[in-house]
Image (cartoon, helix red, strand yellow):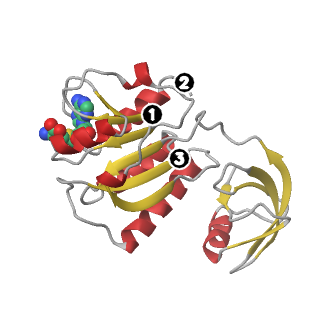
């Protein structure tokens, strides 16, 4: 069934011209049922009451069970990567259940900053990936902060080659975990020491060195493979 992201689940919903065009492409007609979700975990049925060139109007129906989320929200803190690599990370990590994506500037980050246009694109990518993976939650993508601004936690995990601890052995859902993944050049020893002092455990992702865009997905994949 077609799913549409809306700002609020309210009695009468007017869609953007873009969504209206999409519904016409799908050959939907008044009376057809779609699903609407608010990006924060609520999902409902809605019936199409009007569809013309620029406008689509829906009437809200019954709430439905949204796809289950992880027991606590999972945050991915990922170093700034160049080209389309962040786009790929946002898309796949949304499919893998992340709730927040915190971009990080680090000593060896591939690029020093990221523009507003790129941030907006990452938001759209998260929205599309949530729609495709049937999630009713759209992860938020937060503008970059320095690694030193990451708060203390008891459930932080930093992927660092050469570590021996395993994420799934330490994971405890009493607190939402924060997973930290580095740039192509890795983290400096000072950065690792700082994260350790804030409660982050250095963890392994196996004996091979993964690319910077692969490592976040291995962290999230390890959690997803526990069946949550
Ligand atoms: N020479 C860099 C180093 O030794 O850290 C390699 C960096 S790697 C290309 C990019 C990031 O992916 C790392 O900072 C780390 O967060 C993660 N990573 C890659 N392979 C890993 C592994 N086998 N175990 C843990 N983390 C890994």
Q: Quadrant of residue 207 in the image?
A: top left
Check disc 3 and report its element: helix, strand or loop. Answer: loop
Q: How crowded is mark 3: few (under 14 residues within 10 Å), some or many (20 or more)?
A: many
Residue 2 sits above or below residue 189 on the image: below
Tell me the tag on residue 154: 1
> Tag 3 or tag 2, which sits nearer the N-term?
3
Q: Which residue is drawn at 48% across and 39% down?
A: 96
Q: Residue at x 24, y 58 (%)?
A: 82
Q: Quadrant of residue 46 in the image?
A: bottom right
Q: Residues within 10 Å of mark 2 (few under 14, many from 20)?
A: few
Tell me the tag on residue 99: 3
Say whether mark 3 is within 8 Å of ligand 1: no
Quarter of the image for the C terminus: give it: top right
Q: Can you identify the residue that label 2 sits on?
A: 227
Position of residue 51 measured from the top left corner of the image (x, y, whole percent): 76, 73
Position of residue 209 measured from the top left corner of the image (x, y, whole percent): 19, 32
- Give the camera-side residue of 39 and 191: 191
Task: Give the alpha-carbon distance from disc 2 to disc 1, as whole Å.
Answer: 22 Å
Check disc 1 and report its element: helix, strand or loop. Answer: loop
Q: Residues within 10 Å of mark 1 (few under 14, many from 20)?
A: some
Check disc 2 and report its element: helix, strand or loop. Answer: loop
> Tag 1 or tag 2, which sits nearer the N-term?
1
Do callouts 2 and 3 mark residues in contact (Cβ within 8 Å)?
Answer: no
- Give the camera-side residue of 137 and 58: 137
Find the residue positioned furthest to the bottom. Answer: 54
Task: Give left or right: position of 142 versus 67.
Answer: left
In this view of the protein, can residue 186 be seen by the observer? no
Position of residue 226 measured from the top left corner of the image (x, y, whole percent): 50, 22
Q: Quadrant of ligand 1?
A: top left
């Amino acid at each position: 069934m077609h799913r549409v992201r809306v700002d609020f689940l309210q009695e009468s919903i007017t869609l953007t011209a873009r969504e209206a065009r999409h519904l016409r492409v799908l050959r939907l007609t008044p009376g057809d049922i779609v699903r609407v979700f608010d990006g924060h975990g609520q999902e409902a049925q809605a019936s199409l009451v009007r569809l013309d060139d620029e406008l689509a109007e829906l009437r809200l129906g019954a709430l439905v069970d949204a796809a289950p989320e992880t027991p606590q929200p999972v945050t991915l803190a990922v170093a700034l990567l160049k080209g389309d690599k962040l786009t790929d990370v946002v898309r796949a990590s949304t499919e893998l259940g992340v709730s927040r994506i915190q971009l990080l500037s680090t000593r060896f980050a591939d690029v020093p900053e990221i523009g507003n246009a790129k941030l907006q694109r990452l938001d759209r990518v998260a929205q599309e990936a949530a729609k495709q993976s049937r999630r009713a939650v759209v992860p938020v993508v937060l503008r970059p902060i320095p690694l030193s601004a990451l708060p203390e936690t008891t459930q932080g995990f930093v992927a660092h080659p050469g570590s021996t601890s395993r994420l799934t052995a330490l994971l405890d859902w009493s607190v939402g975990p924060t997973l930290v993944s580095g740039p192509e050049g890795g983290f400096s020893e000072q950065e690792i020491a700082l994260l350790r002092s804030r409660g982050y455990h250095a963890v392994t992702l196996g004996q091979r060195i993964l690319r910077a865009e692969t490592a976040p997905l291995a962290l999230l994949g390890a959690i997803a493979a526990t069946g949550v």
